[in-house]
């Protein structure tokens, strides 16, 4: 019996000696850019996002002293999970920047379209502003196509109005929320354009008009799109020439 | 065809800063397009608009007590740069508060915008711009004292039925302090002194001396679907103690409207049947 006890004690001592003598490797990470190299003193075993058909799991294993630490002037949120509170980044795309109408036919509404798409991070909705640097203008003669005021002279850069009549001239746009298949959903745009017959002006920065919101949502979204329809209708008296301007779309998150 | 497809990260930063302090914030700008893009940067101050987290930019004003510069060795703020197709660039923003900065909030947006290329183009062209908000609180203490009030708390519809009502809770919080706060709190629904449900609020930012509509976690539009037992309920909107926002309660009744209408309908049919088909 005593021999057995001695064997057990030797075995435990042996394990401790092996553990003590074995070398350990400390792993840290580094981040580089053309301008910077940052060594990151994190000793995670693993961490990240695991997905299956029904579940998404984020984890952080082996983090030394994870948690929130406050000191005068500093707050440290240590651990992968703290850094992983935003699943999606803020993205904005416009699929085609050329709005080329080609030759315009008088007294017929000429239209062009493109698609804008937005994705927002957790906790943020979005809003999209638009404006033009000037009304449509020819570079050589400075002739202009005025912004539309719609059928009942009731639309401007802040309010949309119905514009279907062929004897109402000008330039304007409509925005309609669509899904990934191009089917109209009105999501994000219904507060600004009741349907596709409604148009409004672009805010004119040349006359210090403020860029206006034409699409927004209060909750986070993934790839929400809208089809923008640009419309020009000219009279037969409109001067010949190549008309151009720049139309800006600005996406910001809701704070 | 030319396109714009940019990602910015983070989408928003929130810092407490002492006067005469400098911090560095790195932004990742990703060009998701298969075309190179010409970009530039700018900072514009904003003011809140409406009660859902909207902003407005007026006259490109900037806070003279906060200075913003890029810390990149090869770039200054406002200088155009090319971001190659399907590539990422880190922009390092240096934010400095002046020693005389007033102890209050400052709100701006860091914009990355496309430089329009309209040379030799004889048609309208679109361009894109994406922004990331900067919420700064200039303070000498890390424990900011905020205070506020509930400017609105109501439950719709007015007539609440046991089966066919959807109770929608709507509220608005007013921030009466010089620093932004987050709407950390809950709506507690009590019947007969028993808590039936606790709905956590979304931690939304309410900017200084401004107001914001509340939103709920997990349930869309703060709307509870029935059925509900008839009786008197009390809903209390309360916030974390450190926010110093007094809670507010609203009582409401749920009536068995649809069962009563159904019974009346049945009685009507029976009476009608008896009237038009009397026993011989």
Image (tube, rainbow, N blue to C red):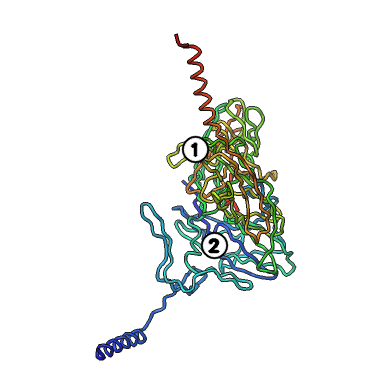
Q: Chain of mark 2?
A: B
Q: Position of residue A34 (x, y in %)?
A: 49, 68
Does any portion of residue A92 appear in the rendered image?
A: no
Q: For the view shown, which residue lies furthest in the front direction?
A: B280
Q: Is residue A226 above or below residue B86?
A: above
Residue on which the image places disc 2: B27
- Quick one: SS at disc 1? loop
Q: Position of residue A50 (x, y in %)?
A: 39, 59
Does any portion of residue B228 appear in the rendered image?
A: yes
Residue on which the image places disc 1: A185
Q: CA distance from mark 1 to mark 2?
A: 33 Å
| Front of the two marks 1 and 2 | 1
Q: Position of residue B222 (x, y in %)?
A: 56, 46
Q: Alpha-carbon neighbours of circle 2 within 10 Å: few (<14), some, or many (≥20)? A: some
Q: Is residue B181 above or below residue B118?
A: below
Q: Quadrant of residue B15?
A: bottom right
Which of the image's four quarters has the C terminus of chain B?
top left
Same chain under badges 1 and 2? The reply is: no
Residue at the image position 73 percent from the left and 70 percent from the top: B99
Q: Chain of mark 1?
A: A
């Amino acid at each position: 019996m005593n021999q057995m006890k001695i064997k057990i004690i030797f075995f435990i001592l042996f394990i401790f000696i092996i553990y003590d003598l074995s070398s350990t490797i400390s792993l840290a990470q580094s981040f580089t850019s053309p301008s910077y190299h940052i060594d990151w003193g994190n000793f995670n075993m693993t961490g990240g996002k695991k997905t299956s058909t029904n579940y998404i799991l984020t984890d952080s294993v082996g983090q030394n002293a994870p948690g929130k630490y406050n000191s005068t002037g500093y707050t440290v949120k240590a651990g992968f999970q703290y850094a992983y509170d935003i699943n999606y980044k803020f993205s904005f795309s416009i699929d085609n920047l050329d709005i080329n109408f080609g030759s315009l036919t008088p007294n017929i509404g000429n239209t062009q379209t493109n698609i804008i798409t937005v994705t927002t991070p957790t906790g943020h909705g979005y809003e999209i502003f638009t404006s033009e640097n000037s009304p449509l203008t020819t570079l050589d003669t400075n002739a202009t196509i005025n912004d539309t005021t719609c059928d009942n002279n009731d639309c401007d850069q802040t309010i949309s109005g119905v514009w279907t009549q062929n004897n109402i001239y000008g330039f304007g746009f409509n925005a309609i929320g669509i899904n990934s298949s191009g089917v109209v959903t009105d999501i994000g745009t219904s507060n600004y354009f009741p349907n596709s017959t409604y148009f409004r002006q672009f805010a004119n920065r040349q006359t210090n008009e403020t860029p206006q919101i034409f699409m927004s949502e209060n909750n986070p979204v993934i790839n929400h799109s809208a089809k923008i329809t640009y419309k020009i209708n000219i009279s037969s008296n409109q001067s010949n020439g190549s008309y151009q301007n720049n139309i800006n779309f600005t996406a910001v998150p809701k704070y | 065809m030319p396109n714009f497809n940019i990602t910015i990260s983070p989408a928003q930063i929130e810092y407490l800063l002492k006067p005469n302090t400098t911090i560095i914030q790195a932004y990742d700008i990703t060009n998701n397009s298969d075309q190179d893009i010409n970009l530039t940067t700018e900072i514009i101050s904003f003011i809140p608009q409406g009660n859902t987290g909207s902003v407005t930019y007026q006259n490109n004003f900037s806070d003279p007590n906060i200075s913003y510069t890029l810390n990149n060795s090869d770039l200054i703020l406002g200088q155009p740069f090319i971001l190659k197709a399907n590539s990422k660039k880190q922009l390092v923003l240096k934010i400095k508060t002046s020693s005389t900065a007033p102890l209050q909030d400052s709100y701006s947006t860091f914009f990355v915008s496309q430089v329009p290329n309209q040379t030799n183009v004889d048609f309208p062209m679109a361009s894109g711009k994406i922004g990331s908000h900067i919420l700064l609180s200039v303070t000498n203490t890390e424990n900011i004292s905020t205070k506020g009030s509930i400017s609105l708390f109501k439950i719709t519809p007015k007539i609440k039925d046991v089966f066919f009502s959807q109770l929608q809770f709507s509220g608005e919080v007013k921030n009466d302090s010089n620093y932004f706060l987050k709407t950390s709190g809950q709506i507690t629904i009590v019947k007969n002194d028993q808590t039936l449900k606790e709905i956590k609020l979304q931690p939304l930012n309410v900017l200084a001396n401004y107001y914001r509509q509340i939103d709920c976690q997990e349930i869309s539009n703060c709307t509870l679907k029935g059925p509900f037992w008839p009786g008197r309920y009390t809903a209390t909107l309360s916030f974390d103690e450190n926010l110093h926002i007094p809670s507010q309660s609203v009582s409401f009744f749920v009536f068995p409207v649809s069962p009563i209408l159904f019974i009346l309908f049945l009685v009507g049919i029976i009476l009608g049947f008896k009237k038009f088909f009397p026993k011989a």
